[in-house]
Image: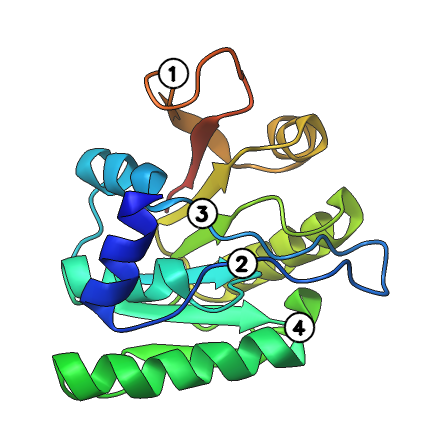
């Protein structure tokens, strides 16, 4: 809990709390990735200059601001909930007051994940179990069509991954599991507390 307050204050944003359950059962409620997990993840996983990370179900934008602050790369948040989207935009305003103009490197889109148009610059995709596997399959399909049009190295990051997500990627896509990070020192006796990285290259 100390890290939650520390980083929100450092980044000059407000990302705590949860939202109610969405009307659409395919979508799960917003819950931000804990800052302790983000610390471990991005000590281990390097985001390079030129990368653009898309967070599907970004909520209030915690991951987006953390990644931009740490790596100064482009980040995109996709959020269907109007209240969370407005919170993300307000966080963008307060973040820039402290950390200066971001020159378009942080963007938020208020739309369904399956309606987000994958851009040729998008090459890293983060999912914290935001919706059903049916929606996930559609989003991955959009990513693969973008890859066919603009071949490039792509990676999908799954935090707290569902077995349905894993089965789909392993058996019905050309993505290959590249690495796994566990958080046993933070969350004991919970095998779901892990992050999987799937890769697709040219």
| Mark toward the start of the polypeptide (2 vs 3) | 2
Q: Which residue is mark 2?
A: 17
Checking the image for residue 80, the label placed there is: 4
Give above or below for 79 relative to 184: below
Q: CA distance from mark 2 to mark 3?
A: 11 Å
Q: How is the image coloured?
A: rainbow
Q: Would residue 142 be found to the left or right of residue 78 on screen?
A: right
Q: Secondary structure at mark 4?
A: loop
| Mark toward the start of the polypeptide (2 vs 4) | 2
Q: Secondary structure at mark 2?
A: loop
**Residue contact at pointers 4 and 3, CB within 8 angstroms:** no
Q: Which residue is mark 3?
A: 33
Q: Secondary structure at mark 1?
A: loop
The x and y percentages for residue 32 are: 49, 53
Q: CA distance from mark 1 to mark 2?
A: 24 Å
Q: Residues within 10 Å of mark 1 (few under 14, many from 20)?
A: few
Q: Quadrant of residue 59?
A: bottom right
Is residue 186 something that shows in the picture? yes
């Amino acid at each position: 809990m100390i890290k939650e307050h520390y980083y929100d204050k450092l980044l000059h944003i407000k990302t705590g709390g949860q939202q109610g359950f969405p009307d659409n059962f395919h979508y799960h409620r917003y819950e931000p990735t804990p800052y302790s997990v983000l610390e471990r993840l991005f000590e281990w996983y390097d985001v390079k200059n030129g990368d653009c990370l898309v967070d599907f179900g970004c909520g209030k934008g915690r991951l987006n601001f953390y990644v931009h602050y740490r790596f100064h790369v482009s980040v995109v948040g996709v959020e269907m909930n109007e209240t969370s989207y407005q919170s993300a935009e307000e966080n963008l305003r307060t973040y820039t007051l402290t950390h200066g103009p971001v020159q378009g490197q942080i963007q938020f889109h208020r739309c369904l994940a399956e309606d987000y148009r994958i851009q040729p610059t998008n090459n890293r995709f983060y999912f914290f179990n935001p919706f059903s596997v049916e929606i996930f399959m559609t989003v991955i399909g959009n990513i693969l069509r973008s890859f066919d049009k603009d071949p490039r190295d792509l990676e999908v990051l799954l935090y707290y991954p569902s077995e349905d997500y894993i089965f789909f990627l392993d058996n019905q896509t050309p993505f290959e599991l590249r690495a796994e990070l566990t958080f046993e020192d933070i969350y004991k006796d919970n095998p779901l507390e892990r992050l999987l990285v799937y890769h697709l290259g040219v």
